[in-house]
Amino acid sequence: METDAEAEAKHRMVLLEKELLQDHLALQRDETRRAKASEERLKQRLQGLEAELEKAQSERDAVYAEMSRQRRALQEELRTRSKQLEEEVRSLREQLETCQKEAKTAREEAEQALREQDETLSQLRAHVANMEAEYEEILHGSLDCLLAKLRAAKPQWDAAVLRLHTRHKEQLRQFALNPLEL
């Protein structure tokens, strides 16, 4: 049988193993407690992170919603402005067409007025030229007639002048004056 020394050694060994197991169990409990505390901190941190994530997602959703609203507002404003610009362009094109038509009409009227003025001026020049020719003809006819009358009257005037000249000469001699000395 076993000896007391062996039994005692076994008993010490069992006690040591028991102490060792108790120490090991205490360490395990300690680690478990630390692990649970760590787990609890991690759970709290995870809850905090989840709350932050939810808050960030909520903010993101709010930002996205605001950006979507702003985008829609900008699109609507852009559509409205685009329609206004299209209407303005259409109106300006109509005004341009009207102005071009008016300018064409005014140009045609001015050209017509110039043609009429040129035609009237040409007619007036022709009329003036005709009148000048007629007046020249009348003047030449009148002068020719006057010259003919003067030629016809010249012998009578020459005779009358000669008679007057002779009579005055006689009167001067009667008064004893020499007509050549006067």
Image (cartoon, rainbow, N blue to C red):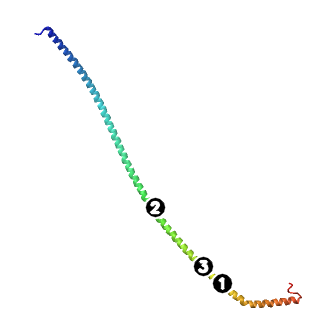
SS class, disc 2: helix
In the depicted structure, whether residue 148 falls above or below residue 87: below
Residue drawn where x is 50% and y is 69% of the image? 109
Q: Which residue is mark 1?
A: 140
Q: Which quarter shows the N terminus?
A: top left
Residue under pointer 2:
96
Question: Is residue 120 found left or right of 145 in the rendered image?
Answer: left
x%, y% of residue 175?
89, 88
Cα–Cα gap, marks 3 and 1:
16 Å
Q: Residue at x 62, y 80 (%)?
A: 132
Relative to the observer, which residue lies in front, 132 or 42? 132
Classify mark 3: residues with Cα within 10 Å, few (<14), some (14-19) or many (20+): few
Residue bearing mark 3 = 129
Residue closest to the eye, 38 or 143: 143
Which of labels 2 and 3 is toward the front? 3
The amino acid type, in three-letter code, at marker 1 is: His
Q: Quadrant of the C terminus?
A: bottom right
Residue at the limit of the structure toward the left, as seen here: 1
Under mark 3, the amino acid is: Ala
Kindly indicate the quadrant of the structure image that contains residue 11.
Answer: top left
